[in-house]
Image: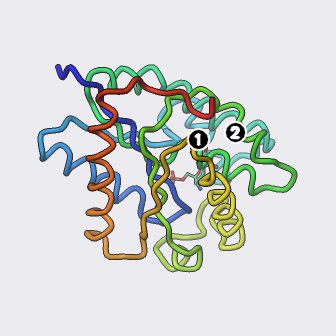
Amino acid sequence: MSCHRGALIVLEGVDKAGKTTQCKKLVAALQHSGRPAEVMRFPDRTTSIGLLINSYLQKDRELEDHAIHLLFSANRWELVPSMKKKIEQGVTVVVDRYAFSGAAFTSAKQGFCLDWCKTPDVGLPKPDLVMFLKVSPAEAALRGQFGEERYETSVFQKTVQQRFEQLMKDPSVNWKVIDASKQIQDVHEDIIGHSLSAITTAQSQPIGELWK
Ligand code: NYM
């Protein structure tokens, strides 16, 4: 077992920005270089809360907007013990979406402010690095399968992008903006560079608490 903790690295962005592909490539590259690494993703649709979220996203079920927001947050909290355990054991955890998606997507709905949306996630393990994969919502819409799940419309995604821009103004979070309109391999190389320095910095620091 490693004596250093692993890092918590998050990839965020609008739908179809390439997060899932890049998370997999990052974990594979870290493992290949001898650094223990694992992927987690939110929502994690495999738990009982995750199954409810899945049926909401697939439009099989209606849920009140505040209630679904709290379920997304609960889905993160239920996985905190296993996430912390991995990090403490020296594994770098690469997360496909986190509390930032939670706040950006719900606050893009009518009648929700960003502060209310952030509250249930206050105190989650704080990422050592959050990379925002930036593509224009118009470009994301041209990438496959856009429009099948709830929230997948260009108009909604444009508002989500604006909410992410607001969240990125917070200097307490280590944000890096990645130009995700580039070739997959070029994007990957940018991501690896930022990740390696975050992993080194995290080794000598305790895990922080988000938005506290
Ligand atoms: N989403 C994701 C939220 O609305 N709130 C959250 O807290 C999280 C983590 O669910 N449209 C939305 C964003 C996406 C969808 O998609 C999950 P995917 O393809 O599983 O990342």
Q: Classify 202 as above or below 19.
A: above
For the residues bearing labels 1 and 2, Cβ distance under 8 angstroms: yes
Picture layout, residue 2 above or below residue 176: above
Q: Residue at x 53, y 43 (%)?
A: 173
The location of residue 123, given as percent across then percent down, is 59, 26
Coordinates of residue 114 in the picture (x, y in percent): 75, 47
Tell me which corner region of the image, top left, top right, bottom left or bottom right, holds residue 5.
Answer: top left
Residue 82, percent from left and from top: 40, 23
The residue that appears at 42% across and 39% down in the rendered structure is: 128
Q: Secondary structure at mark 1?
A: helix
- Disc 2 marks a residue whose amino acid type is Lys
Mark 1 residue CB less than 8 A from any atom of ligand 1: yes
Q: Measure the alpha-carbon separation of dots 1 and 2.
A: 7 Å
Q: Which mark is residue 118?
A: 2
Residue linked to disc 1: 99
In which quadrant is the N terminus drawn?
top left
Residue 73 falls left or right of residue 185? right
Q: Which mark is residue 182?
A: none
Q: Residue at x 34, y 41 (%)?
A: 39
